[in-house]
Image: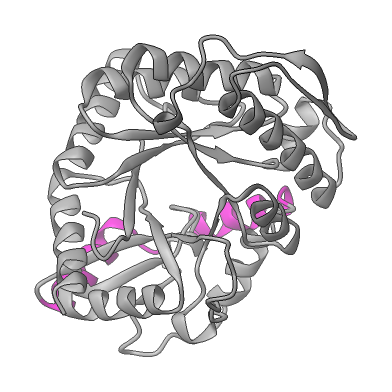
Amino acid sequence: MAVRQISVFSACPQSRNETSQDYVERVTTVAQWSEHYGCRGILVYCDNGIVNPWLVAQQILQQTITLCPIVAVQPMYMHPFAAANMVASLGHMYHRRVYLNMIAGGFKNDLQALNDNTPHDDRYVRLTEYTRIMQLLLSSEHSVSFEGKYYSIRNLKMSPALLPELFPGIMMSGSSPAGAIAAEEVGAIAVKYPQRVNDERKITRQQTTLSGLRLGIIARKKSEEAWQVAQQRFPIERRGKVLHRLAMAVSDSHWHRQLSEMAKEFSLQDDPYWLGPFEHYQTFCPYLVGSYERVAQELRRYIDIGHDTFILDIPPSEQELMHTNAAFQECGSQ
């Protein structure tokens, strides 16, 4: 699904409300769909209430040939050496590259349960140190040392060593100013939830930070069909509005507040940008909805202002990935 050096990633189902057997089968199936339709990798989530992402990543590596897991890494869950060792171990066992989605926090309730009261911007200082230690350990054949505000290591060496071609791709939230600065400092792909194209700030050629977007896509041959599918999949429900307000009350996320404000705005009739699912607590990213041609037009506009990585929402079916692939192919053919 990669066109014009654009990288497209899908997303892995979460384990909530799934039996163990059903979940393992679902992960395998979605990973194989993603690989079949040309995705470079697949995002694996983490929080206090779901299966360990490293174990999910291993299942993906065992059941696919080229697909690269993007493992979400939360500093409160393990020491940076332990996370680096997981990368090196998976590389040694499967000779497959993994990506890392470095996350600074999450919902307040999850952080409080871990006794983490670190302010929002300071969490990105901590995340920068954490990421640098991982980078040092995975890129050096020798012992390394690091002294920071949150982490310190002395003469620490990674074994087994990671082959240079398997060095992980690194992603980080770039929605807040603190996140964008942290991503630039460690050379990560700054991933954010996009605004409408006209509201996006143009990325100049002088900027070295790679930029990615997290969004869903519902595309069909005709826009009317796409919107019908969208409204069936994400029906408007009062309960969703209530859940969204509750989630807002326990989140200090910059992107969560930003999308909530945008959701209040009037949507133009021909605008494929849709925040309905987010507004009703059905998913956490904007959607592009419309014909292959219309969605491709919008994707090209995002690409033209500098976004080179796209992470999709969790695909509900193989057919949906097929339609998404068609939109990206349309984007690359014109």
Q: Which residue shows up at 82% across the image and 52% down it?
A: 121
Q: How many labels does the image show?
A: 0
Q: Can residue 14 be seen in this view?
A: no
Magenta segment, which residues?
Answer: 222-251
- Residue lying farthest to the left in this orientation: 221
- Is residue 282 rendered to the left or right of residue 142? left
- Is residue 112 rendered to the left or right of residue 238? right
Residue 234, picture quadrant: bottom left
Q: Which residue shows up at 63% across the image and 41% down it?
A: 103
Locate residue 102, reporting x and y percent.
Answer: 60, 40
- Residue lying farthest to the front in this orientation: 142
Q: Is residue 144 visible?
A: yes
Residue 263, picture quadrant: bottom right
Q: Which residue shows up at 67% across the image and 60% down it?
A: 180
Q: Which residue shows up at 25% across the image and 46% down it?
A: 39
Q: Nearer the viewer, residue 282 or 188?
A: 188
Dominant SS type (magenta): helix
Residue 307, picture quadrant: bottom left
Quarter in which the N terminus is drawn: bottom left
Quarter in which the C terminus is drawn: bottom left
Locate residue 134, reporting x and y percent.
Answer: 64, 29
Is 235 included in the stretch rendered in magenta? yes
Is 311 included in the stretch rendered in magenta? no
Q: Which colour scheme is used?
A: one colour
Locate residue 257, reporting x and y percent.
Answer: 67, 64
- Is residue 286 rendered to the left or right of residue 145? left
Locate residue 46, reporting x and y percent.
Answer: 54, 31
